Image (cartoon, helix red, strand yellow):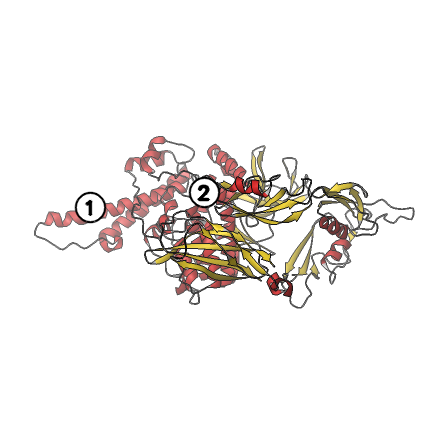
Amino acid sequence: MLNTGTIIAERYEILSKVGTGGMADVYKAKDHKLNRFVAVKVLKPEFREDRTFIRKFKSEAQAAAGLTHPNIVNVFDVGDDEGVYYIVMELIEGITLKEYISKKGKLSVKEATSIAIQVSMGLCAAHSHKIVHRDVKPQNIIISTDGKVKVTDFGIARAASSNTISSNVMGSVHYSSPEQVRGGYSDEKSDIYSLGITIYEMVTGRVPFDGDTTVSIAIKHLQEEMVPPSAYAPDLPYSLEQIIYKCTQKSVDRRYNNMEEVIADLKRSLIDPQGDFVKLNSVDTAAKTLVISDEELGEIKQTSNKKTLEEVEEIEKEIKKNEKETEDDPGRVQLPRVKKRKRKHKTRLVPIILLCLGIAALVAVIYTIIKMSGLFGTKEDPAVQTTVVEAPTEAPAEVPTLVPDLTGMTEDQASQAVSELNIGIQYAGEEASTLEQGLICRTEPAAGTQVEENTTVRFYLSKGDASMTIPGYSDVSAIQFQNELEDMGLVVSTSKEYSDSDEYGNALVEPGYVLAVSPETGTSVKAGDTVTITVSRGLDFGDSAEVPNVVGLMKDDALTVLGKFVDIDVIEVENSDTPGGEVMSQSIEAGTYADPDMPLTITISKEEEPVPAADTAAAADGTWKSNNILNTPDGYQGGEARLELVQEVGGQQTVTVIAEGSEVQFPYQLDLTGLPGVQEGTVYIYEMIDGSYQMLGKYTITFSKVD
């Protein structure tokens, strides 16, 4: 355990311990280089000597550091300092989903679905970067105080998959997929299975498979069917129950293909709770059984430490107990009864053979649990690996579709550039830039972004070199000045400094107002240039500044009044009795004295979402059209197809059938009228297979207003 005040890497100051897990302790720390608070996860001492684990830990954490997504706890840094191995992450104030479920018993359908969608979006982002979590469970999902859902522990999950985590196995095996407990190859579909178990727990308040030992739980994942979640949650919508079933199929081929499909069905379940749109694929009978010999079990013992040998002995006792119970009651392993025949040696032989097969399968499961618990240590024996593990060959990775760099091209040139990439482009507007007028200056998504096939990329044309002058800022609050500069198309960064005093001892510039700007007032700049505002903190009173009262002020005014404080966190909550944007409370009582370098939180009433354009008279005057072309989706067999448009207005989704049956021929030219004022939608494509429609893919399309 690290002491308060410890400095890691000459940068991170440990402030307090905020949590502990099976492999690491978590601390709140101050990053003195970037002047922000972070979470530092430090590996426990027992893992620091395992070089194989450390190597995997560093590699996976570095990969996770490349993930940036609103539903992922961002990793900022990874390293070691004199034997202390650490990961620096985004500091999230909140509780784990496990704690949240424990407090509420079970969650409402709407809340559980919302959380599942956010988790799926985080996992989807990770999978697009070829990162599989492998340990999705409520303990690794955090709900922040402002209601955001974030997935954590990407860095440790894979490193831990083949190492000793005896204190963590019991918690993970409840959510492990059959292929994981079997010790085989796991991919993004393993995350889908674990997500399904997590959704089950959210809506029922319990896990579907439980037991006294990891072995018994693992066997249930492999052999038993779960109790329908609706048995514990009678009001559970049919569609959500079917989504849980599809996520948790024991055969990977029967689960969702990817997180995008999970997200689509979860969103659709909010619109059509009782809909029968979740389709299960045919059963895959090609699964292989893994076995383990006595020699291999002996070799496991030889490579294990003392604690691990004790665990092996306990498992062997359980095996013998199961064998004896099986002899006393053959029905325990569900062996078929064999009628007595005259040839008694055959009568005894058949159940004995079947009994041996059942015991062999049980030993195989126990072996894989031993392997998950780290009984191999750091020793790697190729003979053991090739004999025991019969994992399927990993399919070659698909070549991702990346948005090309269209900057500087004309519209015709851009159309030619994307013609062979199975993506489309659409004009989105004009904006000031340094490029010649009429050339593409920006795209959404940006160049290099990985997208699905048939995505429409929106492009902006340059209005030419539009120069402007930095305005004055006398008696203007920093927030007002920042808004003014951003409206001009400039990128604004801010910093805070104390002000000098005048001859009377008063601050030259009051807290919250502009102290300086760079480039200076009157300087010629262009759209997209960066301008830095220095905000005054008033006079320096050290670590004892009076806290002003901001309750009742609007957000921008409160931030100005709190100009002396450098770390202000704003939390929004729903409150119909308080106008949107008004401060309801503050974490440090007004009139007291506090260190202005310490964090301060203000809670404001959540502002109402802007009324969608579709609800305004101006937008309703026009017609919103899309003329995209839908290419032939992958896997299309030429059968009857169905096209559905999904659009969102005011947080509610609407589903419209565009075309169905023989009238759908690919490539399909859309001549589509969307909801007024809604600029985007998703077209889902289904094909009639074995008497029911099954989704093949989806297209993101954009709409433009026509006069």
* Residue type, numbered disc 1: Ile
* Helix, strand or loop at mark 2: loop
In front of the other: 92 or 64: 64
Residue marked by disc 1: 353
Residue marked by disc 2: 165
Front of the two marks 2 and 1: 1
Q: Residue furthest bottom?
A: 577
Vertical relation: 186 (above or below) 699: above
- Name the image quarter holding the N terminus: top right
- Name the image quarter holding the C terminus: bottom right
Compare marks 2 and 1 and give the one earlier in the sequence. 2
Q: Is residue 409 left or right of residue 669?
A: right
Whole-Å distance between the Cαs marked 2 and 1?
36 Å
* Residue type, numbered disc 2: Ile
In front of the other: 493 or 234: 493
Please provide percent x and percent y for residue 452. Answer: 49, 46
Q: Is residue 56 left or right of residue 347?
A: right
Residue 98 appearing in the image: no
Q: Are the residues at dot 2 and dot 1 in contact (C-beta closer than 8 Å)?
A: no
Please provide percent x and percent y for residue 410. Answer: 60, 41
* Helix, strand or loop at mark 1: helix
In front of the other: 212 or 568: 568
State the mark number for residue 472.
none
Please provide percent x and percent y for residue 616. Answer: 63, 64
Q: Residue furthest right?
A: 503
Please provide percent x and percent y for residue 301. Answer: 35, 36
